[in-house]
Amino acid sequence: MIRQLIAFTALFVLCNSAFAQIANRYDIIIDEIFPDPTPTVGLPDAEFIELKNISSTAFNLRNWQISDGTSTATIKKDFILQPDSFVLICSTSSAPLFSNFGAAIGVTSFPSLNNDGDIIYLKSPEGLAVHAIAYDKSWYQNDIKSDGGWTLEMIDTKNPCTGFGNWKASTNPKGGTPGQKNSVDGINKDEHAPALLRTYTIDSTTIVAVFDKTIDSTAASLTPNYNLDNNVGNPSSAIPQSPLFTEVILKLSTKLRANTIYQLTANNITDCGGNIINPTSVKAGLPLQSDTNDIVINEILFNPKVNGYDYVEFYNRSNKVIDMKQLYVSTRDATNALKSITQLSAAPLLIFPGDYYVITQNKLWVEQNYLVKNPENMIELSSFLSLPDDDGIVVLLNQNQTVIDELHYTHNWQLALISNEDGIALERIDYNKPTQNQNNWTSAASTAGFGTPTYQNSEFMASPQSNSEITISPKVFSPDNDGYEDYCFINYQVANAGFLANINIYDAAGRAVRNIANNSTLALNGVFKWDGLDDKQQKLPVGIYIIITQIFDLNGKTKQFKNAVTLARRL
C-alpha cells in the first residue's frame, strides 16, 4: 500500500510538473516526417510526424498543435513526453497502425503532408512556434527514395533550425525509424552563417528581407541591424515572421521611388546556432507592371539529354523592377489560343534590371548538368509547359494576359555543324533585337557547357553603335562553337521603312558560295549572320571572303556595299 502511494505521488508530481512547464523554442522538435508513404517499403501506408524532446524537461503535450497553415490538429489527451523520447503524431485512423512502433497519438484534422514541399510547425499551448520546417523533395537527397515509401529524417537533432543540409532520406530497410533514433543520426554541426538572400516589396513603405535559414528573432527585430541606401536609412520597425523566422518585415519612414534600385544591408543577425551573418547587401525596389518587351525570352533548352528537363531563361532588359508573381508562361494550341498558363512564382519574387531568371521542372538536374552561376535565380515549377524537341511556342504574359514576349522556336535554328542537338540550349544573341528573328538565335557554345542558365549568354553580342548602313563584326571569325566569334554578323541600318536586301558571299576567286538574303524585307535596323558554311551546309576553307549587300526599295532606289571578312579556324 505504501509503495502504491509513493508511486502514485511520484506520478502526480511528475504530471503536475509537466503541466506547469512552459517550453522554449526547440525544446521539442520535429525530427522525422512521412509525407509520401506510397509505394510502401515496410512502414504502414499512412503519414506521420515524429516529435522528439531534446530538452532536459518533461512536457505534457495536451493542447499542443501541429499545423501546415491550412489544417491544424490539437492534441486533446494528456501525454508526458520525457527527455530524449519520441512520440508519433498521425490521424486518428492511423494511430493503431503505428502503435507497434512506439507511442502514437491520433488527432483529428491531421494536416496532409504535401509530397513535394510543405511548411509544418509545432506550437505550444502558449502560442509559441516551438519548431517549424519547410521541406521539399530535395531534402531526400535521393531521387529514388523521393518517389515515396521513405521517411525524411533529421541528421543532428542538436541542430534543429537548419533545413536541407540536416535532413536525408531514411536508410532503415523498413523505410523509416518511427519511435526510435533516426537511422541517419549523427553529428552535423551548423557552421554556416545566415545569408540575406533577397527582398520583396509589400508597398512603398514596406519591404521584406528574406534569409536563407532560420534566424534569431531577437537580433532580427533590432532596427539598427538594417540599412537602406539612397537616404532611406534604418527602418522604423523590424518584425520577424513566425513560424519559420526566415523573413523580417521592415517598415520604412521614407517612401520607395519607382525606377530606383536600393541596396539593403543586414548586420549582426545570428541564426539559432549563434552563427553571425557576414555583412551583405541585396537589391530592393518598388515593382511596376511589366509591359511588352520589358522582359524577354533569352535562352531555351527544349531538347535536353535523356532523362533531362527543359528550361527557359528570362532577362529583364528594362529599367523596371518587376514582380514575377505577376508573370505567367504558356504555350499555344492548334487554334493559336493560349494554353497551359502557369504562374512563374506563387510568392513575391523581384526581377531587377539586368537580372536573368530560369524556370524549370527540376532545378537540381539543371545545376548538375550546366554551370549555374546564380542558383538563387532558379524557379522550379511542378507543372511545366510542353516544349517539343522539333519546334514549339513559349509565351510570357502579365496578369492582364498582355503578351510580354513570345518565341516560336525550331530546332533548325541550332548551329548547322551540330550533329546531335540533345542537351544544347538555344541562346538569344542580342536581347535588343526582335525575338522572332532567326538570325538572333544560335546554339550555346561548347566551351560554356552548351548552356548558360542564370547568366549572360555565351553567344551574346550587343548591337554595334554606328551610323553606317552596313557593318561587319567581327572582321575575323572562327565558326567552331567555342563561344568566341563563332559568327560573322552583318548589321544594317536604314533611314526609313520599305527597304529590301540581297546579301551574297563570294570567295577570293569571285565564286558565289552563300546566299544570306534574297529580297528580304528590312526593319529600320537589324542583323543577319553567317556561320561559315556554303549553300550546301558544308564547311568552307579558311580565307578572305567578300560580302556583297544590295539594299533597295520598290521605287528603284538602290545601294550596294562591299565588305571583306576573314574565315579562320583554331588549331
Image (cartoon, rainbow, N blue to C red):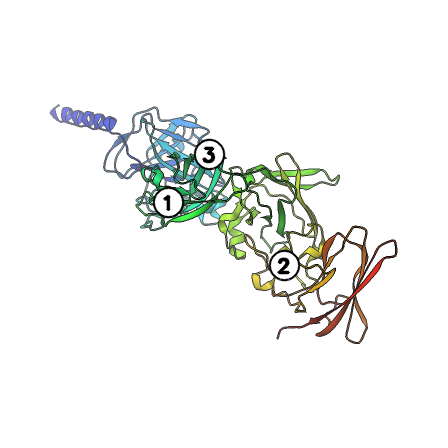
Q: Is residue 550 left or right of residue 424?
A: right
Q: CA–CA distance between discs 1 and 2?
A: 42 Å
The kind of secondary structure element at disc 3 is: loop
The kind of secondary structure element at disc 2 is: loop
* Label 1: few (<14), some (14–19) or many (≥20) C-alpha neighbours in 10 Å: many
Q: CA–CA distance between discs 1 and 3?
A: 31 Å
Callouts 1 and 3 close, C-beta under 8 Å: no
> Image point 68% across, 69% down: which residue?
475
Any part of residue 218 in sight: yes
**Toward the viewer: 81 or 462?**
462
Any part of residue 530 in sight: no
Q: Which residue is mark 1?
A: 162
Q: Amino acid at mark 2?
A: Met
Query: Which mark is first along the chain, 2 or 1?
Result: 1
> Image point 77% across, 73% down: which residue?
507
The kind of secondary structure element at disc 1 is: loop
Q: Is residue 496 left or right of residue 360?
A: right
Q: Which residue is mark 2?
A: 461
**Toward the viewer: 284 or 429?**
284
**Toward the viewer: 467 or 319?**
467
Q: Which residue is mark 3?
A: 205
Q: Amino acid at mark 1?
A: Thr
Question: Closer to us: mark 1 or mark 3?
Answer: 3
Q: Could you tell me residue 331's position as x and y percent?
A: 67, 42
Q: CA–CA distance between discs 3 and 2?
A: 39 Å
Q: Amino acid at mark 3?
A: Thr
